[in-house]
Structures are given as C-alpha cells and as structure tokens.
Amino acid sequence: MAVNDDCKLKFLELKAKRTYRFIVFKIDEKLKQVIVEKVGDPTLGYDDFAASLPTNECRYAIFDFDFVTEENCQKSKIFFIAWYSLSFCSPLHSNLHILLVDTRHCWFLCCRSPDTSRVRSKMLYASSKDRFKRELDGIQVELQATDPTEMGLDVIRGRAN
C-alpha cells in the first residue's frame, strides 16, 4: 500500500510546527494508497478528535496532546493512532498501539475498525499498518490494548506522563 506524500507532509507540519491538533488518514482503495482525510485545527481538543473518527470504518490518526507535568511544565506528545480488530461488539472496541519515541513525544498508533466495517477493509488496514508506520520516522516502542476504555483521555493522560 502506497502512502501519499501529503500524509508525510502533514505529519511533519504537525510535528515541527504544531500546525494541526490531529490528522485522520484513510486508505483509498481505488488509488491503493493512504491519504489524508481530515486535519484538525490546533484549537480543537480530544473530543473533537474522537468525534472525527467514523463509527463504522477503519482509520489511522495522529493526535497532538498538550499537558502539564507534575513539575508544572507544559509539554506536548504526539499520539499516532491505528485501530483494528476483527471482532468487537461496539464501534469503540479496538486494538490500540502506543509507540514511544522520546521523552517529549509519544506516538500512539491507532487504526479504527468497528464491527460494522467490511472485513476486507479491516484486513487492508491491518496489513498496511507497518508500511504506513515506516513512512513516519522515529517509532520505537509499541503497546497493545483491546478495550475501548484504553483509548480514553484518561489513558492518554496517563501515557503522556
């Protein structure tokens, strides 16, 4: 699966300039490539990001999370998100991967694949994840989660600290 150059460009803009709060990617099956579906303005928050993910289709996404540490320092971590699961009972169930880059940035890989999405689509997202990850340089550590509560804002806060 190819990755459209705009995906890499938008990711670099978010990472270097904080131009966006989030980026949602989808696989265009006709073009046979991952493309940018939506970008979120820097003023948007986690709820806007979560609402931007469709309830019945697979997606990849990146979320830039700002937080204050226990030492009262302002920090930001980038979560790269890839949801996919072949069986679940609600649109929020997923396999969630968290990828740590360094002390300032955390990549949170999530590919969303609700039960109502087509099996072919789920397989396509699952099989394309590694190729897409390689295009976004620097991912080092991966952690899986399979419960919808594991991708809530409280979990993101916990992973960021």
Image (cartoon, helix red, strand yellow):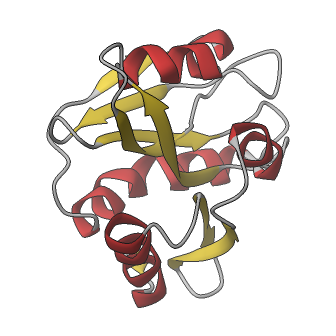
> Looking at the picture, does residue 134 appear above or below residue 95?
below
Q: Residue at x 58, y 88 (%)?
A: 31
How far from the left and from the top, in percent, is residue 99?
A: 28, 35
* Quadrant assignment for the N terminus: bottom left
As drawn, the residue found furthest toward the front would be: 72
Along the line of sight, the residue nearer the viewer: 36 or 56: 36
Q: Quadrant of residue 77?
A: top left
Q: Name the quadrant containing residue 45.
A: top right
Please give the name of the residue rendered at 36% of the width and 39% of the height, measured from the top-left corner: 75
Using the image as rendered, state which of residue 112 and residue 13 is in the foreground: 13
Q: Quadrant of residue 76?
A: top left
- Position of 34 relative to 113 (above/below): below
Looking at the rendering, in which quadrant would you find the C terminus?
top left
> Percent from the top left, x then y, of residue 43?
70, 58
Residue closest to the eye, 68 or 82: 68
Q: How many marks?
A: 0
Query: Where residue 12 sits in the image (x, y, percent)?
Result: 34, 75
- Identify the residue at image location x=81%, y=15%: 89
Residue 33 at x, y percent in the picture: 50, 79
